[in-house]
Amino acid sequence: MKEYWGSLASVLGVLAFCQSLLQVLFPPELRFAALKLFNRIFNVFNSYCYFDITEIDGVNTNELYNAVQLYLSSSVSISGSRLSLTRALNSSAITFGLTNNDTLFDTFNGVNVLWEHIVTQRQAQTFSWRPMPDEKRGFTLRIKKKDKPLILDSYLDYIMEKANDIRRKNEDRLLYTNSRGGSLDSRGHPWESVPFKHPSTFETLAMDPAKKGEIMEDLKDFANGQSFYQKTGRAWKRGYLLYGPPGTGKSSMIAAMANYLGYDIYDLELTEVHNNSELRKLLMKTSSKSIIVIEDIDCSINLSNRKKGTANNSSIGRSYCDPEMRSGPGAGTGDEGGNSITLSGLLNFTDGLWSCCGSERIFVFTTNHVDKLDPALLRSGRMDMHVFMSYCSFPALKILLKNYLGRDESDLDEGVLKELGEVIDKAEMTPADISELLIKNRRNKDKAVIELLEALKERAERKSKSGECVREKNLNDVEEEEQEKRALESPKEGCALDESCKKDEKDEEKKIK
């Protein structure tokens, strides 16, 4: 036993001597140079290159790491049996990610890449103003050297874009409104927000399918048109005007647009905005990928059609009371706060230089009386697409029956369906009125259809009678006007006859003399 330990000690002594000799013969500088040369030789024969993406870049969070994590969570080709599940704040979706040393193969433009998630324990920290996580996390990307230009130029940008789309889809939509009196919240923002939970979609929207398809196609082209707008030199925005009678689904249309695109909504209350400068500040605080809504614009502030005013007061000309000329605090007609927004300020808000401070934004205006709006607001570039929200049509009625009663066209009696198609256009009922009838009798579906048909017939009959009364009234008005004209013309004719008679009498008297 003593001989064994003696031989072992002698071996260790020899090794220590050799190590000391190597350190003397090969100093650290020489060893480092040899290692560097070995790595270069290895890299020459190695066809792969590696990129590390750490979670913490110095003291700041690496946005690329978060983007890669979101992007990889959307893939279903993750190998391994252990995944990490997460649910972010204000998110309605659960995402999964790679665990420690798990790998994933991805393909981009025909190029295969390998992702590996590396998690290691961080060394004991000294005192720091910002404590670091106990674990050091990062991704390692392995690609072939020949694919390096493609990956660095396009692949990483593609990951960032896809991550933003995933983050927006997972997060809850928000509904913003401008603070009362222009006050700021604790973060210095003039907008207050609540989660947007409106369930309206284009599938449930009671509207003609052809018109819905046209709007959806226009929205899709807009959302995918970044390169087009940049190429043509136009601001990446679009304006919609929704007009029609009350209850025709204008607000539901806005909600469907937001849910279709995944955009937030900014509901701008113009009566709470004091002047044009405040209006610009509100616009600057809106985010991209959002819908800015101004409802009932004809009732918000005095922006009526100037042509009508100038037609009645053509001799007076433009005065200080003209909506486009008002300025200064208290110059407007608003009683609360002295609203002094001008038409020019609103036009610059939607189509001026300040409207370009963000991208991918939609402006939506609603009104019940489009004829009251100034033509300057209606032109292309401000309200690009005009959508008339009409009374309920037969295709829209079938959508409502499907939504509220679960009845398809094939589930209804052919005779009842034919009567509904004949009377719906004459009744001129709004989708809101029809929806209320269906909700009231939704437990008895047959009764709901019968009562709806009776209500439509009654409304159509009233419309027909009122139309006849209007026509009779118009005819009476025409007859009265004709009578007034004849009454005004008859004295002139009588006077002309009297003068001719008097002239003849004078001529006869002259002849007698």
Image (cartoon, grey):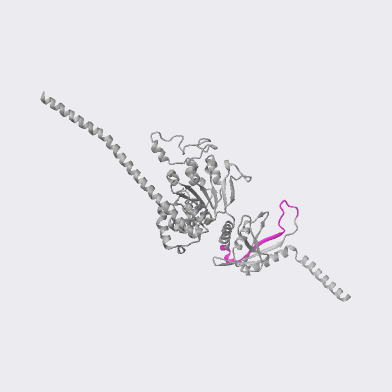
Residue farthest toward the top in the current orientation of the protein: 513
Q: Locate residue 23, reporting x and y percent.
A: 77, 65
Q: Locate residue 395, reporting x and y percent.
A: 44, 58
Whether residue 392 is visible, yes or no, is: no
Bounds of the magenta segment: 126-150
> Could you tell whether 252 is left or right of 317 in the image?
right
> Could you tell whether 379 is left or right of 82 in the image?
left
Residue 263 picture quarter: bottom right
Q: Locate residue 415, reporting x and y percent.
A: 41, 61
> Could you tell whether 67 is left or right of 489 in the image?
right
Residue farthest toward the right in the current orientation of the protein: 2
Tell me what residue is drawn at x 50 percent, y 42 percent.
Answer: 300
- Residue 137, magenta (yes or no): yes
Q: Nearer the viewer, residue 477 or 264?
A: 477
Q: Nearer the viewer, residue 101 or 271?
A: 271
Tell me what residue is drawn at x 60 percent, y 61 percent.
Answer: 71
Classify the position of the N terminus by image quarter: bottom right
Whether residue 454 is visible, yes or no, is: yes
- Residue 3, magenta (yes or no): no
